[in-house]
Image (cartoon, helix red, strand yellow):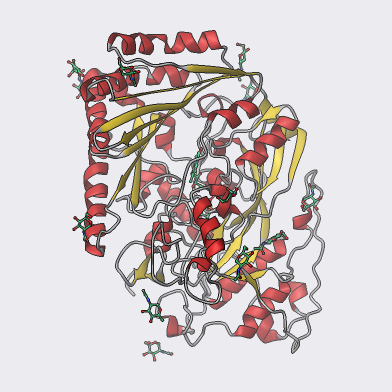
Amino acid sequence: MSRIATTVTSIALHLVFFLLKPSQSLWFEHADTQLTSEALVNLHPNEAALFQFDVLGSSKFKRTRNSTAGCKIYPGDAVWPSETAWEILNKLTGGSLIKTIPQAAPCYQGPLYNATECATLTANWTNTYTHIGDPVEMFGSPVFQGLTCQPPSFYNSGNCTLGGYPLYVINATTVADIQLGVNFARNTGVRLVVRNTGHDFSGKSGGGAALSIWTHYLKNISFVSNYVDDTLNYSGPAFKAGSGVEAYEMYKEASNHGVIVVGGEGQTVGVMGGYIQGGGHSPLSSIFGIAADQVLAYDVVLPNGQFVTASTASYPDLFWALRGGGGSTFGVVTSVTVKAYADMPITSVTFSYTTANISHDTFWAGYRAYLDYFPQNADAGTYAYHFVVSIGPSDLMFLMQPFFAPNKTVAETQALLKPWFTRLAALRINITPAYAHYDSFYPAWLNSFPLEAMEHTNAMTGSRLFPRSNWANETLLNATFEAIRESGEKGATLIMFNMAPTLKAGNTDNAVNPAWRKTVLHAIQNMEWPANATTAGILAARKAFTYGDMQRWRDVSPGAGCYLGESDRLEPNFQQAFYGSNYAKLLAIKKKYDPNDVFWAATAVGSEGWYLKTEDGLPSENGKLCRVGN
Ligand SMILES: Cc1cc2nc3c(=O)[nH]c(=O)nc-3n(C[C@H](O)[C@H](O)[C@H](O)COP(=O)(O)OP(=O)(O)OC[C@H]3O[C@@H](n4cnc5c(N)ncnc54)[C@H](O)[C@@H]3O)c2cc1C
Ligand SMILES: *[C@@H]1O[C@H](CO)[C@@H](O)[C@H](O)[C@H]1NC(C)=O
Ligand SMILES: *[C@@H]1O[C@H](CO)[C@@H](O)[C@H](O)[C@H]1NC(C)=O
Ligand SMILES: *[C@@H]1O[C@H](CO)[C@@H](O)[C@H](O)[C@H]1NC(C)=O
Ligand SMILES: *[C@@H]1O[C@H](CO)[C@@H](O)[C@H](O)[C@H]1NC(C)=O
Ligand SMILES: *[C@@H]1O[C@H](CO)[C@@H](O)[C@H](O)[C@H]1NC(C)=O
Ligand SMILES: *[C@@H]1O[C@H](CO)[C@@H](O)[C@H](O)[C@H]1NC(C)=O
Ligand SMILES: *[C@@H]1O[C@H](CO)[C@@H](O)[C@H](O)[C@H]1NC(C)=O
Ligand SMILES: *[C@@H]1O[C@H](CO)[C@@H](O)[C@H](O)[C@H]1NC(C)=O
Ligand SMILES: *[C@@H]1O[C@H](CO)[C@@H](O)[C@H](O)[C@H]1NC(C)=O
Ligand SMILES: *[C@@H]1O[C@H](CO)[C@@H](O)[C@H](O)[C@H]1NC(C)=O
Ligand SMILES: *[C@@H]1O[C@H](CO)[C@@H](O)[C@H](O)[C@H]1NC(C)=O
Ligand SMILES: *[C@@H]1O[C@H](CO)[C@@H](O)[C@H](O)[C@H]1NC(C)=O
């Protein structure tokens, strides 16, 4: 990454950052530095105009700057900010502005070409840790970046270009950095995106020619032994964490205090960022619910630039929306306060079986037998992460990795699994379950879950939250099973989670997709198109997937939904599918806080008003973001 040269000398930059420290028990240094209107008087009026705050709820977007023709402005537009304007942004953010250079640039001809560096990158490319320190990589879905600069053995684009990567990134370490970025984007019309880790399956952490706010280094964590919120009826341990904190960091810190926090299974997931704002399922969800259910307060920079706390005491509507209504919609969250719970022992179990010695019918009969126990296993507090994957041209593997049983002994876990295992034995499906017992959550989590490989360049993903009511009678359950089996037989990779994240006692209503409350199976299917497919071939494959393979799942779960964090970017009627009956209320809150759509992300609340004009016609972030009708 190249830092922007800080050569601005023509203007006086005696910017004063006022210290606004309200009386609250938890305070992070990143909030010491905030932008104020008073500070802006030190700038030349023309420059100050770039960073002015807006009045909450105002819609005075300067449409006189009309060369944008209803699109977010793009390099080459007459009103694109001058080099000087970007340099001022860099200066005011303390030299935090990064001009994007794609990570794989050393793999392509040009000044950065370096075969050694390319080889190292290539070797590590599927590892999520490789991308966490990079400001822009959209590794949850490089397809939606536009595949314009992958290591050539993954995808050879001939040249390395920015595509759907943002053009500039603010490496945020203070609240002021974020306020400056939000105000700059709003006042200029430049597209704004927010990136934390880049895990998003739909590429929502990037955007072509955008200014990105990178929250990764907001890493503070503080423990509060007794946090009290009477409205939420909560009194107990809590953590306040910066929005850049990842799962492995949060769990480790919780473990240091002898408590646990509801977070994801994946190690590098931004559990205090996009994950928790969009809901967030967890190995602990069958006991404590969805991650968003745990939130006690958010600190957030609003679309008008103001820095506020959203809780039951202030901005309660925003507080409700940020608990499940999705990231990159209502503002930039800087920190989150969440409930913590007493640690507990864990039993985890892993095993697998394949079609090597059994017929496909027997293989699937084993899965059908398993389905019978989903409601009771989840209601017993467990979280079962399991897969059906193709191995070789005609073989399948079932993989349990792991069956995670919090607060259970090995004997209790064996008892829970016994009815299913008895039926597997009757089907002559041999398994060798490996049981492991841990005294606490952290080592159990660390040892039990795989580090998922990422950067799929020819894959599409969709998911469904199958409702518990499908388990009410055998006809419905058989139909559910057949829909899943058909995808498995067609070569889909099935990534399945059996859990029951109902609204647990002690948690309060929020914007989490109501479909989560009713489900016992979050099922993901992944399918590939041929690596050499043409654009038309890819579009056809996508259509067959979204309206065929996914429709089979919708047909057996009418009115249910799917999880916005792990889903199909092209999901039809996403408003119902991702937000359910909460959509109308979420949209009203979006219009109140962000009437001009400073924030936009594919499938986010209010996103239907805009679309991406991509040159190749494939869905991606590689193009102009324009209002529908333009
Ligand atoms: C390997 C892997 C494992 C996963 N495991 C789980 C799991 O166990 N449970 C689960 O529920 N999900 C899981 N997910 C899905 C994951 O939760 C979502 O992709 C989620 O959006 C990631 O959030 P992030 O902040 O890490 O990612 P990013 O891609 O950086 O951000 C996701 C979205 O949130 C926005 N955003 C991020 N931070 C902020 C902020 N501070 N303020 C405003 N908007 C913000 C971004 O703009 C973007 O739209 C997994 C994904 C992967 C790839
Ligand atoms: C607005 O844009 C249109 C189309 O580009 C152009 O014809 C028109 O002159 C512009 N109006 C102003 C006031 O700039
Ligand atoms: C290529 O990268 C390696 C590793 O970073 C470095 O040691 C080497 O000097 C580079 N080669 C050139 C020609 O820049
Ligand atoms: C990256 O790849 C190199 C070469 O294979 C290896 O030595 C190194 O450990 C890898 N690094 C990571 C972070 O995986
Ligand atoms: C790469 O860029 C150069 C210069 O713009 C162009 O001539 C060439 O055709 C491009 N190659 C590919 C494969 O796109
Ligand atoms: C971003 O900022 C952090 C904290 O100051 C620093 O450690 C890191 O190197 C920066 N990253 C980049 C790519 O500039
Ligand atoms: C927050 O993080 C910063 C940067 O790493 C560090 O200097 C500071 O001490 C931390 N503060 C708290 C309260 O943890
Ligand atoms: C508040 O919590 C207490 C203890 O956790 C519980 O007994 C009580 O019923 C709760 N009250 C409400 C209104 O939820
Ligand atoms: C398949 O059967 C053979 C012979 O009975 C046995 O050796 C082998 O372990 C079996 N493989 C599996 C995967 O069960
Ligand atoms: C864990 O199990 C113990 C003993 O069975 C029980 O008392 C406790 O309530 C359980 N904890 C939770 C959070 O379910
Ligand atoms: C199963 O449930 C469906 C949907 O409620 C219903 O139409 C059907 O009659 C039920 N079948 C049986 C056998 O109860
Ligand atoms: C459900 O499928 C099983 C076979 O997998 C079959 O034996 C049973 O009769 C089916 N039940 C109904 C109600 O169709
Ligand atoms: C892709 O490759 C396959 C097998 O190598 C070949 O049969 C097919 O014609 C190719 N398709 C295209 C569009 O090049």
Q: Is residue 99 left or right of residue 35?
A: left
Is residue 70 shown above or below 580? Answer: below
Is residue 588 shown above or below 408? Answer: below
Q: Is residue 110 left or right of residue 338?
A: left
Q: State which quadrant residue 94 falls in.
A: bottom right
Number of residue marks: 0
x, y percent for residue 320: 55, 44
Locate the N terminus and report the quarter of the image it occupies: bottom right
Locate the C terminus and report the quarter of the image it occupies: bottom left
Q: State which quadrant residue 267 falls in.
A: top right
Q: Is residue 49 visible?
A: no
Residue 58 or residue 624, whichever sits in front: 624
Residue 328 or residue 583, whichever sits in front: 328
Q: Where ligand 5 lies, by image quadrant?
A: bottom left
x, y percent for residue 170: 63, 66
Q: Image point 26% across, 64% down: which residue?
A: 535
Is residue 548 shown above or below 446? Answer: below
Is residue 226 shown above or below 368? Answer: below
x, y percent for residue 465: 37, 35
Q: Image point 53% across, 35% down: which residue?
A: 265
